[in-house]
Image: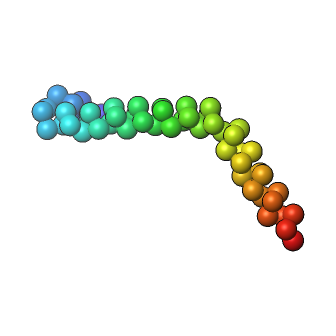
């Protein structure tokens, strides 16, 4: 834990901290989009599966 604190206090570690924050924000955005679009994506794949199975 001390290493992480030392890294965040140094200028060299500042870039790493910023990348971590950006990664966290992108992760939150992706999870939010999956929650919003999840049902539509599921329906799309179920529709495609139904079409493929009906061709047999």
Residue in front for this viewpoint, 37 or 17: 37
User: Residue 21: where, in percent of width, then height?
Assistant: 33, 32
Q: Is residue 27 left or right of residue 44?
A: left
Which quadrant would the C terminus be assigned to in this image?
A: bottom right
Residue found 75% across the figure and 56% down from its top: 48
In terms of depth relative to the viewer, which is nearer, 51 or 24? 51
Q: Is residue 9 visible?
A: yes
Residue farthest along the left direction in this orientation: 11
Q: Front-most of 33 and 20?
A: 33
Q: Height in image: 22 above or below 49?
A: above
* Horizontal side of residue 16 vs 21, given as left or right: left
Relative to 1, residue 47 above or below:
below
Residue 30 at what x, y percent from top left? 50, 37
Judge whether 14 appears above or below 49 on screen: above
x 56%, y 35%: residue: 33
x and y, in percent, of residue 53 in the image: 84, 64
């Amino acid at each position: 834990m001390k290493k992480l604190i030392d890294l965040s206090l140094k200028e060299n570690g500042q870039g790493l901290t910023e990348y971590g924050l950006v990664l966290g924000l992108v992760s939150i955005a992706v999870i939010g989009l999956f929650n919003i679009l999840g049902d539509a994506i599921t329906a799309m794949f179920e529709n495609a599966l139904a079409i493929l199975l009906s061709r047999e």
